[in-house]
Amino acid sequence: MTIPVHLARLLVLAVIFVNGWTDAPNAIATAVGSGALSFRRGVFVAAACNFAGAAAACLCFPAVADTMGNLVAFPDPRSAVVVLNAALLSIVLWAVAAWRFGLPTSESHALLAGLSGGAVALGAGAAQLSIGAWLRVLAGLALSLPAGVAAGRLFRRLLAGRVRRPASWQRGAAALTALLHGVQDGQKFLALLLLTDGLGGDSSTSRLTLALLTAGVMALGTALGGKPIVEKVGSELACLSPADGLAADLGVGVVLLTCSLMGLPASTTHAKVSAICGAGQNTDKHVARQMARAWVLTFPACGAMAFLLTKVMMG
């Protein structure tokens, strides 16, 4: 049992790293795409603010972690560890494959799909799904798309011709987006670290220590870049002026903050892309369709991989 639990911990850290590598760059994509930040400075801002957000989240927004930690109840520790390992491995494989094509993915969706696939593989009655927790996750994911579009469009209208030096403001808005990404995704994966500690019988590690570990690994992943995703989201998806980029960043900030206050796990990827579509001009429909296909495929792909991996691990 010790090795599978240690493997689960390593895989959680790998997913946090991949999240910082493939998802966190969305926070700075608009600022880089509009020219408000260079890519190198943007990565530094994203890494620092993701660290701060993830570290502070355990004190300010514990409801997100609690929701994610209560998604599935397993009959025994062994089955829980197997499904968790399968789900985490499927997330890493899917995120890296999508990154290869510069496509942003939602690790929230991937986690949801992976846990579902693994639970189904155990058989009927072997795992109990918390309907309340799952509804909160689905509500957050469903809210991020229309709310992102509406908020981006609203801020574009409110800011039109009223902001001097929008590029300076956008740098601050990008930092805020990265901070809120750390709050949201830091809490999701903190929940998984807490779960693996419980399964391993070691619950002595403090929540703050695990939050700092989560923040550090996420910041490290962000610091390595994510240039293909930044270019796809910030430059190819829509034509963004600094004012448009500011509107998109403010829009996604409102969505993420609202979901965090409500304890709803939200997708930073979905909120950011939809806010860009609302605030930007001449949205490239081909790029938007590519991203939408990746999002839709996340559920069957991660669910199927976790299902097969669970079957193999259970022997």
Image: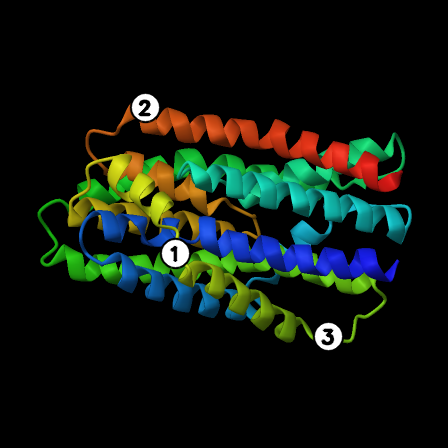
Three-letter code, disc 2 = His
- Residue 230 is situated, as x and y percent measured from the top left of the image, at 33, 47
Q: Which residue is mark 1?
A: 225
**Residue 286: mark in rendering:** 2
Residue 205: mark: 3
Q: Are marks 2 and 3 in contact (CB under 8 Å)?
A: no
- Of circles 2 and 3, the one toward us is 2
| Residue 213 % position (x, y) | 59, 70
SS at badge 1: loop
Q: Quadrant of residue 2?
A: bottom right
Q: Who comes first in sequence, dot 2 or dot 3?
A: 3
Q: Within 10 angstroms of label 1, few (less than 14), some, or many (20 or more) residues?
A: many
Q: Quadrant of the C terminus?
A: top right
Q: Residue at x 8, y 47 (%)?
A: 161
Q: In the rendered view, would you say 57 is above or below 308?
A: below
How far separated are the C-alphas under marks 2 and 3?
47 Å
Count neighbours of disc 3 (C-alpha within 10 A) and say few if under 14, some if 14 to 19, many if 20 or more. few
Q: CA distance from mark 2 to mark 1?
A: 25 Å
Quick check: marks 1 and 3 in contact, CB under 8 Å?
no
Is 244 situated above or below 223?
above
Quadrant of residue 194 within the rendered picture:
bottom right
| Amino acid type indicated by mark 1 | Gly
